Image (cartoon, rainbow, N blue to C red):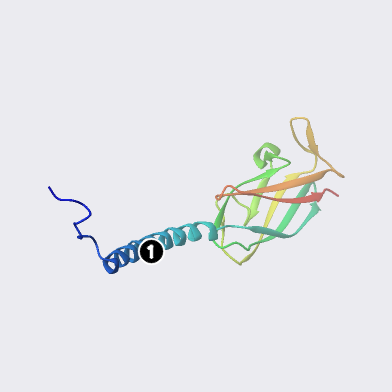
Amino acid sequence: MKRFERDKRAVSAVIATVIIVAITIALAIAVAYWMSGLATIFTRYEKIEVKSSWVTLSGTNYIVSLNFTNTGAVDTTIDSVFINGKPISEWGATAGGSLASGSNVPIGKALQGTITFARGAASGDSELSPGVTVTITIHTSGGKDYLATVVLP
């Protein structure tokens, strides 16, 4: 029977150090790939900035005009437009230009869109008449909402 005190076989300090360094390098590379994947996910974002908004009265119709730019890092698409929290179709309104449903909003390009609705248009108990504050909401394919507010003349 062997006694452990007399058995001098073991892994040398040099080989143990090489194994530890190899494991550490492998883990560092794995963490670096993981972090670069996370960084890519978090740096891809959309952001629409409404530069200006105004309303004009053309006959019996209001025309709301918006100038906007995508200042984010990815292109986006306009899914829908709302007036005071309700889809524009409930007001009998139409969106034109770059506000039309399905419009592409590329990075950095200045765009303009319009929303046209009748003076006195109603949805439920709400009416779009002179002096009413109207909030236009642009909803994008990224799931975000961007707001612009105008007061009807």
Left or right: 19 in relation to 72: left
Q: Residue at (73%, 41%) from the top-left corner?
A: 84
Left or right: 112 in relation to 151: left
The one of 98 and 32 positioned closer to us in this rendering:
32
Q: Residue at (37%, 60%) from the top-left corner?
A: 27
Q: Residue at (73%, 56%) from the top-left corner?
A: 65
The one of 77 and 122 positioned closer to us in this rendering:
77
- Which residue is most to the bottom? 14
Q: Residue at (23%, 60%) from the top-left corner?
A: 10
The answer to whether residue 131 is above or below residue 42 is above
Q: Position of residue 40 (x, y in %)?
A: 48, 60
Name the amino acid, label 1: Ile
Left or right: 42 in relation to 113: left
Q: Quadrant of residue 73?
A: bottom right
Label 1 crowd (10 A; few <14 / some 14-19 / many >=20) = few
Left or right: 150 in relation to 17: right
The one of 115 and 71 positioned closer to us in this rendering:
71
Q: Secondary structure at mark 1?
A: helix
The one of 20 and 80 positioned closer to us in this rendering:
20
Q: Quadrant of residue 105?
A: bottom right
Q: Position of residue 53 (x, y in %)?
A: 76, 57
Q: Position of residue 98 (x, y in %)?
A: 62, 57
- Which residue is most to the top? 125
Q: Which residue is mark 1?
A: 29
The answer to whether residue 126 is above or below residue 140 is above
The answer to whether residue 107 is above or below residue 148 is below
Q: Quadrant of residue 83?
A: top right
Q: Position of residue 78 (x, y in %)?
A: 58, 51
The count of marks equals 1
